[in-house]
Amino acid sequence: MAQGFEVTEGVLKHGMPYLAFGQGRPLVFLRWFTPDHANPTGWMRKSEIKTMAPLARNFRVYAVNRAPGMAEGTTMADIAREHAEALHAEFGAPVDVLGISSGGSLALQLAADQPQAVRRLVVASSGYRLEDAARESQMKYATAAAAGKRALQHMLTQGIESPVKARLVGAVGWLIDPLVRPKNPADTLAFVQAEDAFDLDGRLADITAPTLVVGGDRDEYYAVDTFRHTADGIPGARLEIYPDTTHLGAIKHARFAPDVTAFLTAAEP
């Protein structure tokens, strides 16, 4: 038991690992950026379940990761197609999808390319494309990890304006990198390359599922204008911007779970 929920593990079609917990209608949570295409363990597992616990009171949350063994040259469209096939095989009907950070990129691609898979869509701390700084930090991380070098400092220093703080945080990242280093860095690099090329500008109108976009106004990876452009491009989409809130702070904000729950359970218009 974790956070009062019984947690089960499974694997979807194409080898996508997932954790499931909570009660209610299925809510597929497409995970944020992870070092490995696997279910988290240890403190990372506990943190994920704790973050999703408020939603698991009303939904059966399926926390889904990308499949291991991702081939070089895989595109976000390829990943979205695999997810659509896996979700159809598991549920047989459209499901609610919550994509957070990198999972939001995938969720948007899924909803645009495979509309039959998505009942309602929530995109949190993510947008129609990566910002240049975020793209650079992810690529530095992935290429360093693939080369067997310490890499975490490239991710942790993203968005830190103070040079002194950036050096301190970077040093901490360098020290703890061996504890969270990808077991299969080729997977990490393949996904980062796919997200690097991801850009749905011009395709947002293809998303027909009712959509909620959520972001913080102090997000280190995405500008508020990117959240707004994403919501404006999707027909009928709603936008919620939380004040004084960071990238990860948005999904831990007191309003997040109530906003998402209200959106997903609202009556059809």
Image (spheres, helix red, strand yellow):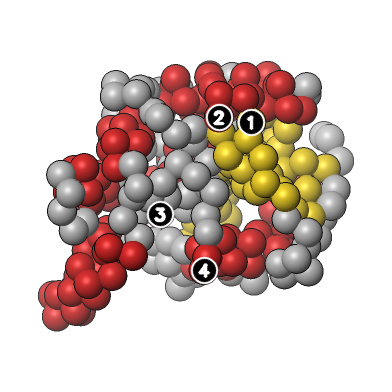
Q: Which residue is mark 3?
A: 224
Q: Assign a secondary structure to mark 3.
A: helix
Horizontal and vertical percent position of residue 119: 72, 31
Q: CA distance from mark 4 to mark 2?
A: 24 Å
Q: Residue at x 45, y 73 (%)?
A: 244
Which numbered disc, 4 or 2, marks the residue that appears first in the sequence?
Answer: 2
Horizontal and vertical percent position of residue 120: 70, 36
Q: Residue at x 43, y 66 (%)?
A: 246
Q: Are marks 4 and 2 in contact (CB under 8 Å)?
A: no
Which numbered disc, 2 or 3, marks the residue that appears first in the sequence?
Answer: 2
Q: Residue at x 20, y 68 (%)?
A: 174
Which numbered disc, 1 or 3, marks the residue that appears first in the sequence?
Answer: 1
Q: Which residue is mark 4?
A: 43
Q: CA distance from mark 1 to mark 2?
A: 6 Å
**Which quadrant would the C terminus be assigned to in this image?**
top right
Amino acid type at mark 2: Gly
* Mark carried by residue 15: 2
Binning the other alpha carbons within 10 Å of mark 3 as few (below 14), some (14 to 19) or many (20 upward) gives some
Horizontal and vertical percent position of residue 100: 52, 49
**Which quadrant would the N terminus be assigned to in this image?**
bottom right
Q: Are marks 1 and 2 in contact (CB under 8 Å)?
A: yes
Q: CA distance from mark 1 to mark 3?
A: 34 Å
Q: Residue at x 40, y 54 (%)?
A: 224
Amino acid type at mark 4: Trp
Q: CA distance from mark 2 to mark 3?
A: 35 Å
Q: CA distance from mark 4 to mark 1?
A: 24 Å
